[in-house]
Image (spheres, rainbow, N blue to C red):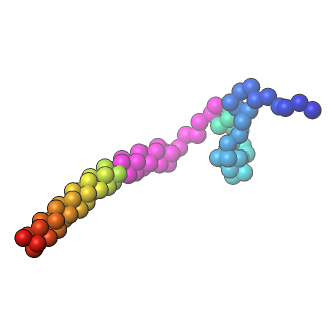
Amino acid sequence: MGKAKVTKKTDVLSASEIGQYHYCSCAWMLQRCGYEPESPALVVGKQFHVALGDTIDGFEKKIHYARWVAILGLFMLSVAVVLFFIEVVL
């Protein structure tokens, strides 16, 4: 027996597609044939996910800024400790 060739992207199933098939095989087949589901809930869900993504991006920027502030604070603390010991020795 020879190896099976995958000629089209549609010949490969992802784990997500297997889950969709298990949930509803008819909806999976329709989506695979190019039909997109239409529902007001999907529009709301997509908007929610976009807003959530923007929120997460904002948190990532704040975390990045906080790290730099913490590094600067540690540097300043180190300088203060060194200056303190220099003055104690002198």
The mark tally for this picture is 0
Quick check: 90 left or right of 36? left
From the image, give the main secondary structure of the stretch colored magenta: helix
Q: Which residue is located at x 29 percent, y 56 percent?
A: 67
Point 71% across, 40% down: residue: 13
52 left or right of 38 in image: left
Query: In front here: 87 or 58?
Result: 87
- Quadrant of res 11: top right
- Residue 39 within the segment the image draws in magenta: yes
Q: Residue at x 31, y 52 (%)?
A: 64
Where is residue 43 drawn, in percent x and y? 47, 43
- Residue 44 visible, this angle: no
- Residue farthest toward the top in the current orientation of the protein: 7
Residue 5 lies in what quarter of the image?
A: top right
Is residue 64 in view? yes
Report x, y in % for residue 9. Answer: 68, 30
Position of residue 83 in the picture relative to residue 27 (left or right): left
Residue occupying image coordinates x 46% and y 45%: 46
Q: Nearer the viewer, residue 68 or 61?
A: 68
Percent position of residue 79, x then y: 16, 62
Q: Residue furthest right?
A: 1
Q: Which residues are magenta?
A: 34-57
